[in-house]
Image (cartoon, rainbow, N blue to C red):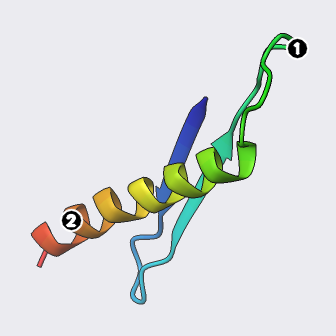
């Protein structure tokens, strides 16, 4: 899994989150949607904390 977070330096700040998830063909019963949603949620949470420290 790779999680890429990019922001713009201009106001308003834009945050982009990209999640790349590659599973083994042997992976069974994996909820890909849940994993990616949680990854995006965590990335946005961390980004929010980072941005709040810039004020």
Corner quadrant of residue 54? bottom left
Q: Residue at x 73, y 33 (%)?
A: 30
Mark 1 surroundings within 10 Å by alpha-carbon count, few (fewer than 14), some (14 through 19), many (20 or more): few
Out of 41 and 53, give the one closest to the viewer: 41
Neighbor class of circle 2 (other Cα within 10 Å; few <14, some 14-19, many 20+) is: few
37 relative to 52 in the view: left or right = right
Q: Secondary structure at mark 1?
A: loop
Specify whether 35 is left or right of 28.
Answer: left
Position of residue 17 measured from the top left corner of the image (x, y, whole percent):
57, 58
Do labels 2 and 1 touch, CB within 8 Å? no
Vertical placement of 10 versus 6: above or below?
A: below
Residue 53, placed above or below residue 13:
above
For residue 12, above or below residue 30: below
Q: Quadrant of residue 32?
A: top right
At x 78%, y 18%, the residue is 27
Residue lying furthest right in this view? 25
Name the residue carrying label 2: 49
- The x and y percentages for residue 13 are 42, 80
Marks 2 and 1: which is nearer the front?
Answer: 1
Q: Is residue 47 left or right of residue 30?
A: left
Residue 38 x/y as whole percent: 51, 53
User: Which residue bears the numbered disc 1?
Assistant: 25
Viewer-proximal residue among 32 and 4: 32
Report the front residue among 21 and 48: 21
The residue sitting at 54% across, 41% down in the picture is 3
């Amino acid at each position: 899994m790779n999680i890429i977070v990019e922001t713009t330096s201009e106001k308003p700040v834009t945050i982009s989150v990209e999640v790349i998830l590659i599973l083994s063909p042997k992976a069974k019963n994996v909820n890909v949607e849940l994993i990616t949603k949680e990854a995006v949620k965590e990335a946005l949470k961390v980004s929010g904390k980072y941005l709040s420290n810039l004020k």
